[in-house]
Image (cartoon, coloured by chain):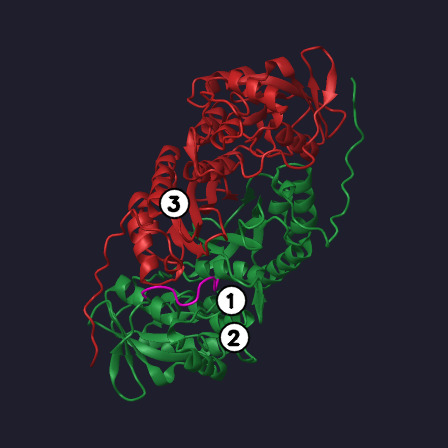
Chain colours: A red, B green
Amino acid sequence: MTNIQTPICPMPLAHNEKIVLGHGSGGKMMTDLITKTFQPPLANPALDAGNDAGVVQPPPHTKLAISTDAHVVFPLFFPGGDIGRLAICGTVNDVAMMGAIPHYLTASFILEEGLPISTLVKVVDSMQAAAEEAQVQVIAGDTKVVERGKADGLYISTSGVGTVMSGHTVGGECAQPGDVVIVSGTIGDHGIAVLEARGDLGFKTELRSDVAPLNHLVREMLGVSDCVHVLRDPTRGGVASALNEIARQSGVCVTLNESAIPVHPSVAAACEILGFDPLYIANEGKLVAIVGREDAAKILDVMRQTRYGEEAAIIGEVTESPAGRLLMKTALGTTRVVDVLAGELLPRIC
Amino acid sequence: MTNIQTPICPMPLAHNEKIVLGHGSGGKMMTDLITKTFQPPLANPALDAGNDAGVVQPPPHTKLAISTDAHVVFPLFFPGGDIGRLAICGTVNDVAMMGAIPHYLTASFILEEGLPISTLVKVVDSMQAAAEEAQVQVIAGDTKVVERGKADGLYISTSGVGTVMSGHTVGGECAQPGDVVIVSGTIGDHGIAVLEARGDLGFKTELRSDVAPLNHLVREMLGVSDCVHVLRDPTRGGVASALNEIARQSGVCVTLNESAIPVHPSVAAACEILGFDPLYIANEGKLVAIVGREDAAKILDVMRQTRYGEEAAIIGEVTESPAGRLLMKTALGTTRVVDVLAGELLPRIC
């Protein structure tokens, strides 16, 4: 037997190092990056096993809700959050919006050559904090590296698997005439906070992104009522796009009451100046719920007792026609159609 | 009621159109892209529901294997495959390597502004063909668009959920002294085919990427034996990196028999010229299996009867020491250490 080399003793990754193509090679550098940067904060048995897939045992006889989101927000850090917190919360919320309890997440990273490893460490730490808050585990991951200029720092795609809470059928097609529309708090905070971080606002506000995991809020809501028909987190395209989609899916009309919609004064001011409508601005820690009128008061009550639902409000109702439309009763007493966005309002917001 | 507009009647997406930022907006253009480009080929009930997450009912009492991969291969199309087929097969295989049957996939797309929609259509069609072959469904998706120069055409992250076949515990930590090592066919085909597509080879070959779903092959193998201990698809870093990882995870020594390793003549020739070792070249439709010696013959036999295992071969064995090392008995009769790659051999190979 010849050429037996001494075992490799990898050096710690210095945080002032930068990502190079070798970190995506499948070789020693990638193993170092994974074992030193990703695994320690995100540790759990399924991830630590280091296999091609995480193996877990879900509760028996449950339906699964499975979701995915790519995250390309710019800048990577903004008041109230960062791409890591966003990547966890975005997928946790998508799973929760099916009336499910999210359990397992996966995360795949596309890193740009030259990204400081200290930046990646901050992002992964933030992911872990959000995962801990949401009580989910990242059980599988992947890392690719692309050449300088072929990404924008980093992109993160997360997927989530949750178990649907039994006895609840929640979906965009379940809104019924007579239902009422609830929003969990002020709208547009995320979009305006990111605009401010880009320096596109031209003035300073105290605004922070609302990016937050909403699964505990959803669990409380479903705990007090069997009449939660639709849940949706109004991200890109805002409340207007989410409710338009629901109106189409359910074949109903949704009518909002403009004066009932909670809007933070800084968001209202920014929208006034920029000519935006807060209804189209992205949220990352808010949900809209369409619920049976008979339970609306108790659902609202339990929402207001949770951290991310303190400012929940009833903002509208569901009627039969015109089917597929979102209408708004304005403060002036008129009614107008609120359409979906035609093109792009704010690129790279999530 | 004022201003009721006529319902929007979206125009068909012409295939000579290009992706613009508005396709990632959460508004009408994104809905058009999703309903015309993604949903028709990939159609299934969970995806068609159009909710934030797909809801499915897995078999009761089964463990789940959950996996994710980002795909950034360059170029997008290469002999034998493309990024779409790769994105499906890569994740199907990762799930299958845990001894699981993959059922549900998610796909998140990061599209570069300016990408021809005809290219996207070709990629999605290829994904559907691969999904059909693998008998999996894409039940949730997401689309983001980044500015020109901030991606390289498109990146696709897929995640997969499968159910572990009962009675089988397969994992990188399960190799035992006395086991034998099987490879399902010729190695290095994918890496060299992509190199050729890049024009980096300097000569033409008949080689095609091996990119393929291996889940049916795995099911056949597990159907005839309870002694399949480890399965792994040797992608980035090749067979050398995969077996090094397994040797470390299991605390065993793996010794390969150089003359038993199947290598396509074009791969051998290309490696000879470029100074590469086929053991480090990526595969996307091959697996290495570490199995109990007592069942090796019947496992090999069933493998050779399947489409992607016709050239399967026993290429080595597992011993106790030196623990954590991969060795090679060369054709000349010497034994050498086969280490993991230190840096990068071929960037953007998957």
Amino acid type of the residue that numbered disc 2 sits on in the rendered structure? Thr
Q: Is residue A218 above or below residue B143?
A: above
Q: Which residue is mark 2?
A: B306
Q: Earlier in the sequence, mark 1 or mark 2?
A: 1
B122 or B225: which is nearer to us?
B122
Chain bearing tag 1 is B
* Disc 3 residue crowd, few under 14, some 14–19, many 20+, Cα 10 Å: many
Amino acid type of the residue that numbered disc 1 sits on in the rendered structure? His
Chain bearing tag 2 is B
Q: Position of residue B52 (x, y in %)?
A: 56, 39
Q: Which residue is mark 1?
A: B216
Residue B41 falls left or right of residue B84: right
Tell me the SS state at disc 1. Answer: helix
Please identify the residue farthest to the right as the structure is shown.
B6
Q: Is residue B337 above or below residue A287?
A: below
The answer to the question of whether label 1 and label 2 lie on touching residues, with beta carbons closer than 8 A, is: yes
- In the image, the segment drawn in magenta is B342-350
Give the spatial CA distance, label 2 vs label 3.
35 Å
Identify which residue is drawn at 54% across, 39% down: A348
